[in-house]
Amino acid sequence: MRLTDLLARSRTACSLLGSSDLEISGLAYNSKTVEPGNVFVAIRGFVHDGHRYAEEAVRRGAAAVVVDHPLPDLAAPQVVVADTRRALAGLAAGFYGDPSRDLWVCGVTGTKGKTTTTYLIDAVLSAAGHRTAVIGTLGVVARGVPVEFHTTTSTTPEAPELQRLLRDLRRGGVDHVVMEVTSHALDLARVASCRFRAAVFTNLTQDHLDFHGDLDRYRDSKSRLFAAVEPDGASVVNADDPSGAAMAAQSRARVITYGIDAAADVRAADLSLGGGGSQFTVVWPEGRRRIALRLPGRFNVANALAAFAAGLARGTDPAVIGPALESVAGVPGRCEVVDEGQPFTVLVDYAHSPDSLEKILHLAAQVSTGRRIVVFGCGGDRDRTKRPIMGGIATRLADYAVFTSDNPRSEDPAAIIRDIEQGAGGADNRESIPDRREAIARGIALARPGDIVVIAGKGHETYQIIGDRVGPFDDREVAREVLRARAAGAGGNGRGGGAAR
């Protein structure tokens, strides 16, 4: 493809310094990954400014450079734009043939519930006969379509990876894509050139304030998704959440509301919650249907309502939607039970915000009549304000709490734990063990028959980030190892049974 054609396809408003009549081989936004013939897009990151690496990109063979201001003495054509991030999204869509144009793409955003909701919607669409794919925290799941995709720590991929992925999915026969869309992705324009036929809002609670600054800006970031929905599409909004109205206000498309407590287009009635799942009647303007959901917790009822509403928005028969929701047995790392035959419950969950920790501990009370033991930590280089809040929630709602490390990244794990401890005050039903493996072993060692041990924060993750090192770590596998050792008579971690009350 020639640069002239790409600029026209991407509808990128720019001024050109040098010739655009040249062949290009691809896009790059990291100077270290530039290949001969690439267009290098200089992105201003949180730490590094890509403009500083433009010369390196040219030395590596970049055919042209996209910048937000002219760079002197650069030996390559320059495409000057107002916003290089938005330009990257447009160029990526143009280079890969604007794949979302030929797909029904549904974006799911919210603080919590995105992953489970995408899986539920995927089940509904698949049951309706569509060829589907899910993109999100757990990577890419495409039913029967081989796709080469290298997952990153980002839930929503950067624009070039996302557009290439959508192209490959389309080539493989996928016609419907359900995608988690984070506030970071919206702020950083990763999805700026995606065509959304539907969007779903789950909820908004405190998280990522290290990035957004305050809850209002966090809300504004989320609402951008609904402004992007095609006018003939649909915006599915949680009416129980106070921020739902702000999402609906941004939509040019029709709005479908759902909720448990609020008057909504799709709502739950006759709700019965249990440890093995939930039963409820879903009511919508044209009918009602009883649902036996295999996912436990009130929050999963809300996720199921969102998926039901999304199915209706797509025109799916409710007689198909109901059984599809009932078929979903679980989502990795979300309320995932680790069972090695022990006489108590071990539950691994991704809960890493105050609200999600509170909800999973309330669920633990429904699942077990025994004591609630929680093991959790908070991520480093992330929102510090939530740490003491979570410490307070843990000591208030659990019978015993073990504070530990999550992904400390560049922070001192002990300093993170001290922040958590501030919220616990003088509570005596807790202890701190920085080593996460030891902390999990301690939590399990404390358990007696009928108790429940909640291991929160990392869920499906199979790694731990300490400093600049990413090492293998899976809460589920660690719990299994500890449980097997305990069953073999070598249980615990040498600290004894303790006195969890």
Image (cartoon, helix red, strand yellow):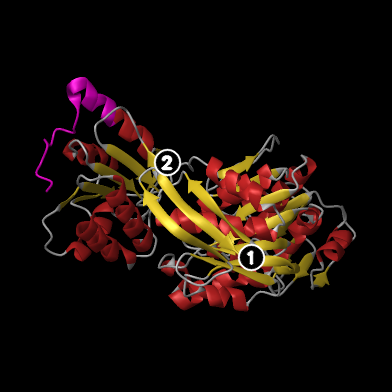
* 10 Å crowding of disc 1: few (<14), some (14-19), many (20+): many
Q: In this view, does 410 lie to the left or right of 175?
A: left
The residue pinned by badge 2 equals 463
Q: Is residue 19 visible?
A: no
Q: Is residue 399 left or right of residue 107?
A: left
Of residue 298 and residue 171, the one placed in the foreground of this image is 298
At label 1, which amino acid type do we have? His
With respect to residue 476, does 106 lie above or below?
Answer: below
Q: Residue 163's spot in the image, x, y percent?
A: 72, 53
Measured in 3D between alpha carbons, the distance from the residue under mark 2 to the one under mark 1, in whole angstroms, is 32 Å
Q: Residue 281's spot in the image, x, y percent?
A: 51, 56
Nearest to N terminus: mark 2 or mark 1: 1
Q: Is residue 205 covered in magenta?
A: no
- Marks 2 and 1 close (CB-CB < 8 Å): no
* Magenta-tinted stretch: 482-501
The residue pinned by badge 1 equals 51
- Determine the secondary structure under disc 2: strand
Q: Is residue 486 covered in magenta?
A: yes
At label 2, which amino acid type do we have? Tyr
- Determine the secondary structure under disc 1: helix
With respect to residue 270, does 167 lie above or below?
Answer: above
Of residue 96 and residue 194, the one placed in the foreground of this image is 194
